[in-house]
Amino acid sequence: MFSAVLDTSVLWPSTQRDFLLSLAVENLYRPLWSSAILEELRYTNLRKLLARSVPPAKAEAQSARLIEQMRLAFDDAEVPHWEPYEGTFGLPDFADEHVVAAALAGGAGAIVTENLKDFPERRLPRGIQVVATREFAADAVSVAPERALRAVSRMPARRRYPPESVDDLLLVLRERYGMDEAVTMLEELL
């Protein structure tokens, strides 16, 4: 199965994260991440909740729960032993080295990120490509559109505030995240 490291930039938006991980539940790819990616996600989620005036203790608990749920649902996604590779790629931003290190240590074929410029191809190990989220989503959906639609169809049951339909979710994926190609494939099955 194709493995891809999901950078914090694609995990932070909750609807996008839910969609990508729902595709993984349907075995359309195997998600990978490092402990550093999860820590960045915890921190960015905490900041988002605090900016929305969620009390600090509640925001911290919700952010920690998110990471706990991801670790439980994808117990083989966290790549061990990535640390020795960190700092060996010469990326423009040293803070991104852990992402490539996790991809190398985990045997990933891709890094899914919105920060494409921070991962120049000439600095990546052979066999690892950098892919924008919308392109990755289209590739994953194209593997088995019926299973991808099943993944999206299960998402409304997990979303209560506000409640959303499959059509609502597809509209968000298209308009907010630019996933036109993936959404078009899914709409063809409705």
Image (cartoon, rainbow, N blue to C red):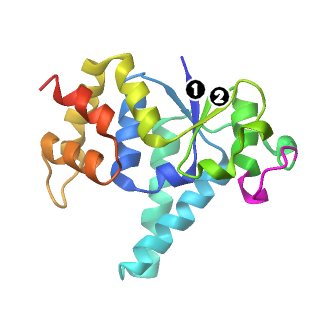
Residue 186 image offset from top left, x and y in percent: 23, 28
Q: Which residue is mark 1?
A: 3
In this rendering, position of residue 5 left or right of residue 178? right
Magenta span: helix, strand or loop, mainly? loop
Asked where in the image residue 41 lies, by quadrant, the reply is bottom right
In this rendering, position of residue 12 left or right of residue 92? left
Query: Which range is magenta?
Result: 88-96
> As shown in the figure, which amino acid type bears the numbered disc 2?
Ala
Q: Are marks 1 and 2 in contact (CB under 8 Å)?
A: yes
Q: Which residue is mark 2?
A: 108
Sooner in the amino-acid sequence: mark 1 or mark 2: 1
Residue occupying image coordinates x 23% and y 31%: 184
Residue 81 makes an appearance in the image: no
> On screen, 37 above or below 30?
below
In this rendering, position of residue 138 left or right of residue 111? left
- Helix, strand or loop under label 2: loop
**Front one among 17 and 184:** 184
Cα–Cα gap, marks 1 and 2: 5 Å
> On screen, 120 above or below 143?
below
> On screen, 123 above or below 145?
below
Residue 163 image offset from top left, x and y in percent: 14, 54
Residue 131 makes an appearance in the image: yes
> As shown in the figure, which amino acid type bears the numbered disc 1?
Ser
- Helix, strand or loop under label 1: strand
Residue 48 image offset from top left, x and y in percent: 43, 71
Residue occupying image coordinates x 79% and y 57%: 94
> On screen, 189 above or below 91?
above
